[in-house]
Amino acid sequence: MNELARKIVIGLEVETYSINVSSYSIGRSLSRPRPGLSEDGEQFSRDTSIGSEYKSRPYATVREAFFLLKTGLRKYLRRLYRAQKNFKNHNVPLLVGGWMDRAAGAHMHISVAGREMTPAMARSLAWHIHDHIPLLIALGANSPIWDRKMTAVASNRVLRGSRTYFRPIRRGRLSRKDNEEMVFNRGRKTKPPTLELRIFDSNLPEFLVASLCVVKAIALRWLKDQPSTNRVLYADYLRARVGAALRGTRCRIPWGGEWLSLGKYLDRFVREYREELEQMDVPDEIFDVLRLAKRGYNGARIVREACHNSIRVHPQTWQKRFAKRYESGLGTLLSGNLLATFAKELKVRLPNTGNVWLGRRGGAFN
């Protein structure tokens, strides 16, 4: 692990719907871990819109983020712990961006170790991140369900909520308003100032950490005072943003003046940021998420296929059937198993990624 990579510190806030383990009903009830389980720096709180919110401790490395995010979310699974009196009737998180008529998101807070983030620093970093936001939307899209109905959209949250909750901004612009996609967060006594990125759907740890990995690579290049890699016209940016929310991994994203498929965009990103990725000690499971994206899979596609499977079995009770499978799969995933095992619980078969290369054929990143 390169010491420079530890200087970019990132924390996550994850809003969640809930599954009641007694009735397997999906709603916005509060999920709580058993008292006394939280660690220093993390918080389990009530979100006024969705129900529950998990606030992580700051992560200095990608590997740390992957381990601790799973460990933190696992604490919601009360039936796994001893002396739990009411383990038959509690709520576990449903990590999706939409289900009812409200959106659940994930916010990313970026800071620099040993330095206080100033508005000028945040604006400079936001300049580097801005034109890669369509990639982050496509990679993290996870709200194909809206108002309890299946849709063909990858991220209903981005399409329906951008104007109200995270309005698009132009490259180089940054404010302290909470309703923009990137915000300078002044912090408080227990939290340093950060650049807050608000466009992510609530999602499984694998997809959230893959997005964190992309952001960290961009931030490392910024920290080394190197120029930003992608600059596009604002009109193209808005078009790509909507396309990523609509079509997810089937979208096309501009790099400069060239519109690329998501797979080619990822390859170019890996080539451009190879040095930063090598410095970060990224777990294999996170590279597998990027390979899955090249094969056309993100969280939205997994959820949609799982819901289709439940509808085919019994249309009248498909949501309950999906919730039961999801609760079982989440317990497996947060216990250290692979994403493919989680998908198997949902009756979704993920494609083989063994022959999927990242970067360039003959010189793929490993």
Image (tube, helix red, strand yellow):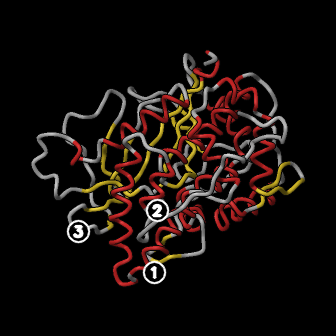
Residue corresponding to mark 3? 23
Point out residue 157 in the picture as x, y percentages from the top left corner: 53, 63
Residue at the image point whose x is 35% and y is 54% from the top: 93
Image side of residue 347 versus residue 240, left or right: left
Residue at the image point whose x is 56% and y is 28% from the top: 111
Q: Nearer the viewer, mark 1 or mark 2?
A: 1
Q: In what element is the residue under mark 1?
A: helix
Residue corresponding to mark 1? 312
Residue at the image point whose x is 43% and y is 29% from the top: 191
Residue corresponding to mark 2? 103
Examine the rendered structure and indicate whether residue 35 appears above or below residue 156.
Answer: above
If you read the primary sequence from the N terminus, does the residue marked by circle 2 or circle 3 appear first? 3
Residue at the image point whose x is 60% and y is 74% from the top: 152
Quadrant of the image occupied by residue 325:
bottom left
Determine the CA span between mark 1 and mark 2: 26 Å
Which mark is drawn over residue 92? none
Point out residue 311 in the picture as x, y percentages from the top left corner: 44, 79
Mark 1 touches mark 3? (CB < 8 Å)? no
Examine the rendered structure and indicate whether residue 343 appears above or below residue 207.
Answer: below
Q: What type is the residue that disc 3 sits on?
A: Ser
Q: What type is the residue that disc 1 sits on?
A: Arg
Q: Nearer the viewer, mark 1 or mark 3?
A: 1
- Give the residue furthest to the bottom: 316
State the residue in front, 124 or 242.
242
* Total number of numbered discs in the rendering: 3
Q: What type is the residue that disc 2 sits on?
A: Ala
Quadrant of the image occupied by residue 361:
top right
The C terminus: image quadrant: top right
Label 3 crowd bin: few (<14), some (14–19), many (20+), radius 10 Å = some
If you read the primary sequence from the N terminus, does the residue marked by circle 1 or circle 3 appear first? 3
If you read the primary sequence from the N terminus, does the residue marked by circle 1 or circle 2 appear first? 2
Determine the CA span between mark 1 and mark 3: 21 Å
